[in-house]
Amino acid sequence: MRKFGDLDPLLHSQLRLAIVSLLVSVKEADFSYIQEATNATNGNLSVQLTKLKDAEYIDIKKSFENNYPKTTCKITKKGLKAFERYVDDIRNYLSPKK
């Protein structure tokens, strides 16, 4: 009988997966860009970014631009490896090996 492995619970959240998927495809992205792409609320996006940062999947840099706060995110090597592993795990679920 075939056994299914555990999926990364951090990436199994729709919003966190969307954030990481987005960051994989760009060098870095600011908060507004991520919010627009994911259609997330300020509060929810903030919470999910913090969870990803705490897991060391992303780096967050806070700065000021024209006297306005700016939050910029980018994926880490650990985050990229976790994402690739997650994608492989999903592929195994979709195309079971006999």
Image (tube, rainbow, N blue to C red):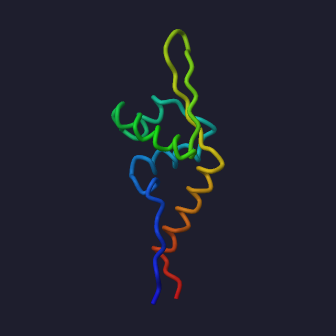
At x 52%, y 68%, the residue is 89
Of 32 and 77, the residue lying toward us: 77
Of 3 and 65, the residue lying toward us: 3
Where residue 91 sits: x, y (%)?
51, 70
Where residue 30 sits: x, y (%)?
52, 30
Horizontal arrangement in the rendering, residue 26 relative to residue 50 (left or right): right
Asked if 86 appears above or below 40 in the picture, the reply is below
Of 75 and 55, the residue lying toward us: 55
Horizontal arrangement in the rendering, residue 52 relative to residue 44 (left or right): right
Q: Residue furthest front?
A: 54
Image quarter where the N terminus lies is bottom left
Q: Residue furthest right?
A: 77
At x 46%, y 77%, the residue is 4
Horizontal arrangement in the rendering, residue 41 relative to residue 2 (left or right): left
Horizontal arrangement in the rendering, residue 78 relative to residue 37 (left or right): right
Asked if 63 appears above or below 41 in the picture, the reply is above
| Numbered marks: total | 0
Q: Residue furthest top?
A: 67
At x 47%, y 85%, the residue is 2
Where residue 45 sits: x, y (%)?
40, 36
Where residue 77 sits: x, y (%)?
66, 48
